[in-house]
Amino acid sequence: VPTPFLESLESLESLVTPALVVDVAVLDRNLAAMAQHAAAGGVALRPHAKTHKCLQVAARQLSLGAAGLSVATVGEAEVLADGGIDDLFIAYPVWADAGRAGRLRALCERVRLTVGVDSPAGAAALGRAVAGAGSPPEVLVEVDCGQHRSGVGPGAVAGVARVADDAGLRVTGVFSFPGHAYRPGAPPGAAADEARALGEAASVLTDAGFEPAVRSGGSTPTARHTGAGVTELRPGVYAFNDAQQVWLGTCGIDDVALCALATVVSAPAPDRVILDAGSKILGADHPDWAPGHGIVPALNGALVTSLSEHHAVVPLPDGARRPEVGERLTVVPTHVCNAVNLVDELAAVQDGDVLDVWPVAARGANR
Ligand SMILES: Cc1ncc(COP(=O)(O)O)c(C=O)c1O
């Protein structure tokens, strides 16, 4: 297994471990490849900012032609709007309560805002919350395409859309998230499920007198398998990639643009070392099918087999050299969104040097 990046870790000596480092060249390659894929398929790209929460990465995505950004919370939308991004989709069934109403109205005044809804009550509450705003938000009705998380069945979208319309909102389409793609072998089928569900939902809206121009879908594993009829893609992880994407076959280890820089703090047995990259930097997300909690490329692709908050346990595979205590190594996190959410800043590395420090600006903007 090749070392994905950071060939020369000496240049990162100034960083105190554990730290998250971004290889800017790999990031730019990933961003450009997805932008080209979307352009070639004639679909809009609206990357999900939950992965990076970082204005520097958002700016790169927009400069490559992204239509706008997707976010999960009103707070994330506020941070990106403060950063000058003027077209935002909150891809979440927002509950527009008193703590969000004024903030949603303020967002409508300064950006083109689109909000997800998946219930008549949620649509009515959103309508009440933004009543009187100069330009009310557009609304996309969320469709469940197989993950069975949020979203209504395609047949139920018209009921939600009618309530939104009666509440003064402009229904412009449907969206879904094919989260059931996150299993080995599942991405092509999940992409087909999503295209079918979005198509059915859009027909139902058309029959009910709406004009569903937007059919927004996509995740990182399904982005390459996009079905016909999807008009917009919202992948997030593709910017950095992670171990989960490597195991799913979405990308190769060389496409990983973000790693945790870690130090070997203990070598208690001939065949095991301990790194200082615990769950407090790698994140604790661990799907049941995943073979480990992270990959250590420089040790023949060794796996992190267990995590405590400040310890990563790494059994050495056959043939792997035994690193010394004090040596620095990179670890590919299992789920990069989790890892980024745990740090205040990312060290941006280019040509072996720390080029910049990027604040994780929307970190903690969870409400
Ligand atoms: C609603 C929604 N859209 C898009 C994405 C981005 O997909 P991915 O994380 O596979 O890049 C997510 C991720 O959780 C999501 O929940």
Image (cartoon, rainbow, N blue to C red):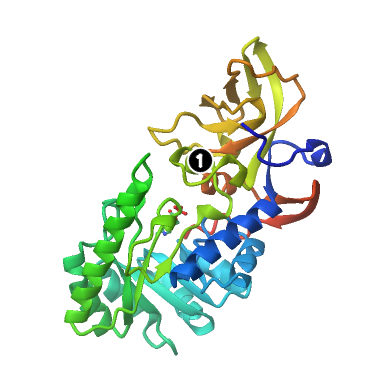
Is the C-beta of the residue carrying label 1 under 8 Å from the nearest atom of ligand 1?
A: no
On screen, residue 223 versus residue 178, left or right, reads right
Q: Going by the picture, which residue comes out furthest to the top?
A: 270
Q: Residue at x 43, y 87 (%)?
A: 135
Task: Name the quarter where the N terminus is drawn.
Answer: top right
Residue assigned mark 1 = 246
Relative to 243, does residue 22 appear above or below in the rendering? below
Q: Is residue 149 at least partly visible in the picture? A: yes
At label 1, counting other C-alpha atoms closer than 10 Å, the crowd grade (few under 14, some 14-19, many 20 or more) is some
**Ligand 1 placement by image quarter:** bottom left
Snapshot quadrant of residue 116? bottom left
Three-letter amino acid code at disc 1? Val
Asked whether 24 or 101 is in front, the reply is: 24
Asked whether 109 or 138 is in front, the reply is: 138
Snapshot quadrant of residue 186? top left
Asked whether 341 or 354 is in front, the reply is: 354
On screen, residue 144 versus residue 225, left or right, reads left
- Numbered disc 1: secondary structure: helix
Snapshot quadrant of residue 256? top right
Q: Is residue 45 at least partly visible in the picture? A: no
On screen, residue 162 versus residue 323, left or right, reads left
Relative to 182, does residue 270 appear above or below in the rendering? above
Count numbered badges in the picture: 1
Relative to 329, does residue 42 appear above or below in the rendering? below
Q: Residue at x 68, y 15 (%)?
A: 267
What percent of the width, then of the height, locates residue 297? Answer: 63, 32
What percent of the width, then of the height, locates residue 13? Answer: 82, 38
What percent of the width, then of the height, locates residue 181? Answer: 36, 48
On screen, residue 174 versus residue 271, left or right, reads left
Q: Residue at x 71, y 22 (%)?
A: 265
